[in-house]
Image: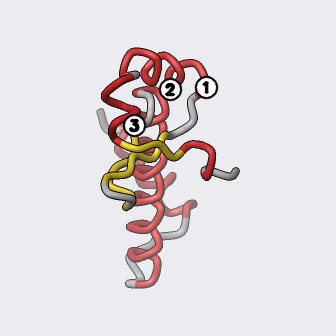
Amino acid sequence: MRYTTRVKPISYLKANAAEVLLHLAEQREPLFITQNGEAKAVLQDVASYEETQETLALLKILALGNLEIDAGKVRPVAEVVKRLRARRAGE
């Protein structure tokens, strides 16, 4: 996806805030805001932001799982199932 068309100066945001927010919600594309010709911020709709945060959380969980595998903190699934069944039977 090309974002070059989604770059606007901060003055555009100030003058068209309501329109910008509507577009963000409808199109779900980020808007890059510049100040003095330099990129300063990225605006995105709340739904996209939440999806991004959920994706990052899942990636973090996967990374932590890989670290546990690398550290040898794993058990065969059959052993875990056997232990869980024994625990459940003892309840």
For the residues labelled 2 and 1, the Cα–Cα distance comes to: 5 Å
- Residue located beneath label 2 in the image: 24
Residue 85 visible from this viewpoint = no
For the residues labelled 3 and 2, the Cα–Cα distance comes to: 54 Å
**Dot 3: what SS?**
helix
Task: Give the residue furthest to the right.
Answer: 1
Residue at 38 percent of width and 51 percent of height: 34
Quadrant in the picture for residue 43: top left
On screen, residue 50 versus residue 35, left or right, reads right
The residue carrying pointer 2 sits among few (fewer than 14), some (14 to 19) or many (20 or more) residues within 10 Å by Cα, namely some
The residue carrying pointer 1 sits among few (fewer than 14), some (14 to 19) or many (20 or more) residues within 10 Å by Cα, namely few
**Mark 3 is on which residue type?**
Ala
- Residue 66, disc: none
Whether residues under marks 2 and 1 lie with C-beta atoms below 8 angstroms apart, the answer is: yes
Whether residues under marks 3 and 1 lie with C-beta atoms below 8 angstroms apart, the answer is: no
On screen, residue 2 versus residue 87, left or right, reads right
Residue at 51 percent of width and 46 percent of height: 7
